[in-house]
Every structure is written in structure tokens, then in C-alpha cells.
Amino acid sequence: MNHQETRQSLLAEYPQLTIVEHPLLESKLALLRRPEVQGGEFRRLMSDISRLLLWEIMRSFPTREIEVPTLLGTAVGHELAAPLVLVPVLRAGLGMLDGMLSLVDHAQVGHIGLFRDEETLTPVGYYSRLPEFAPEARVLVLDPMLATGHTCVEAIYQVKKQGARHVIHANVVSCPQGIAEVAKHHPDVPIFTGVVDAKLNDKGYIVPGLGDAGDRLFATD
Ligand code: URA
């Protein structure tokens, strides 16, 4: 199957999946992939991509009509009708946070700390600080790399356990295995991704992917 056929078959198999297609996102992603892009430039590009993902994610968010006084009368406007909570999974998820907050500075932020045991590739929790979720709150779990899916699945369980009813997952790069894993455990959770790459390698890294996104964001490689 070529890339386009793989894409179509994933979209048919997983109705919860949205692959955000936009020339601006695609061109920034191509820059982000380059091995020489590190630190500040990497963070800026990931922020830009995250803003573009949020734009698409919020397309279906509920709004209510309001009257807005203007200099020359009254206009009909809209305001967001549900609280928004952003939950970056530490540490790479932090790379998606600032870009999104620059569009929605009213959002609450929760944090979940999970690292991957490099032997078993299973997530190990080391931190959790989540707000109380209103029943109508939209809760975005942020992790730029949807690889095995184990970390994301666990993070979604944690926010659901805390009362989140409308959970959405956003990532920058995903792969079929990660999508399948999230869909298996959380078929109710929409997944928004910038691109679906071909596969995982034996260390659980997405290929071609970005390498270790946390290391590249924070120059710890
Ligand atoms: N985490 C990363 O940072 N990169 C991958 O490819 C997979 C998991």
C-alpha cells in the first residue's frame, strides 16, 4: 500500500482518528524532522504545529450565542460553552503546551508524569496533578509522539478516573500501532495527529519519526 492508501485505510478503520492536513502544518513538520533542528527552533516549530492542531480540534467544540456591544450597536457573537483543560504528559507533552495556551489562555492545565521503562516499554507513573473536571469539560491529553500507545492509554485512564468525560488526544507524529492501542482501550477518545508514520523500531521509536522528542525539546541528548 502506498502512503495515501495506508492513510485512507486507517481513517476507515478508526472513525475516531483525524489526520490534520494543512500545508502549513506539513511544511513545519518537514522542518521539525531535520536532525540538525534542536532546542529553541525545535520548540518553536512544535508550538506552531500544536496551535494548528488545536485549531482543528476545537472546530467541533460547543459554543453559545452572546450579544456583544460594539461602538455602533450590538453584534451576535459566540463564546466557548465548555471549559478546556490541557494535560501534557511530562516531559515531551510540555512541548505542545505553550503554543496551545497562546490561543486559549483561559484553559486550565493538569500534569501527568509518566516515563517509559526502556526494557518493557510500559509506562511508569511518577507525578500527577489534575484539576477537578467539570462534566462538560473538554480535556486534551498532549503527547507529541504516539508510539506504542501505552503511555497515552495510561494518561487517558488517569484523566477519566479523575472524572473527565470528554477526552481528546493530540499528538504531532503517530504510527498505526499507537493508534490501534488507543482505539482498543479508549474507543470514545478522538485522536488528532499531524502525521501517521510507517512503524515502530525495536526500541519503540517511531520510524521515520523525530527521534526522542523530549531530548530534542530540552537539548538533553
Ligand atoms: N518517544 C519519543 O520521543 N519518540 C519516539 O519515537 C517514541 C516515543
Image (spheres, rainbow, N blue to C red):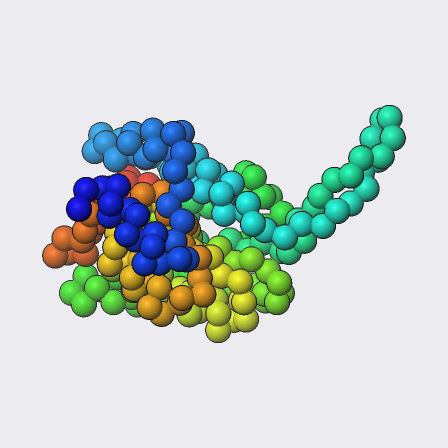
Q: Is residue 151 left or right of residue 138?
A: left
Q: Quadrant of residue 126?
A: bottom left
- Residue 35, how many percent across, how many down? 21, 33
Q: Quadrant of residue 184?
A: bottom left
Does residue 98 appear anywhere in the picture? no
Does residue 134 appear anywhere in the picture? yes
Q: Is residue 200 left or right of residue 157?
A: left
Looking at the image, which residue sits at the far top?
72
Residue at 32 percent of width and 58 percent of height: 13
Q: Is residue 63 above or below residue 155?
A: above
- Residue 177, how many percent across, how many down? 24, 58
Q: Is residue 164 left or right of residue 37?
A: right
- Residue 161, how many percent across, how many down? 48, 73
Q: Is residue 49 above or below residue 107?
A: above
Residue at 40 percent of width and 34 percent of height: 22
Count the marks: 0
Looking at the image, which residue sits at the far left?
202
Q: Quadrant of residue 96?
A: top left
- Residue 69, how many percent across, how many down? 84, 35
Residue at 56 percent of width and 49 percent of height: 60
User: Which image quarter holds the C terminus?
Assistant: top left
Residue at 38 percent of width and 53 percent of height: 17
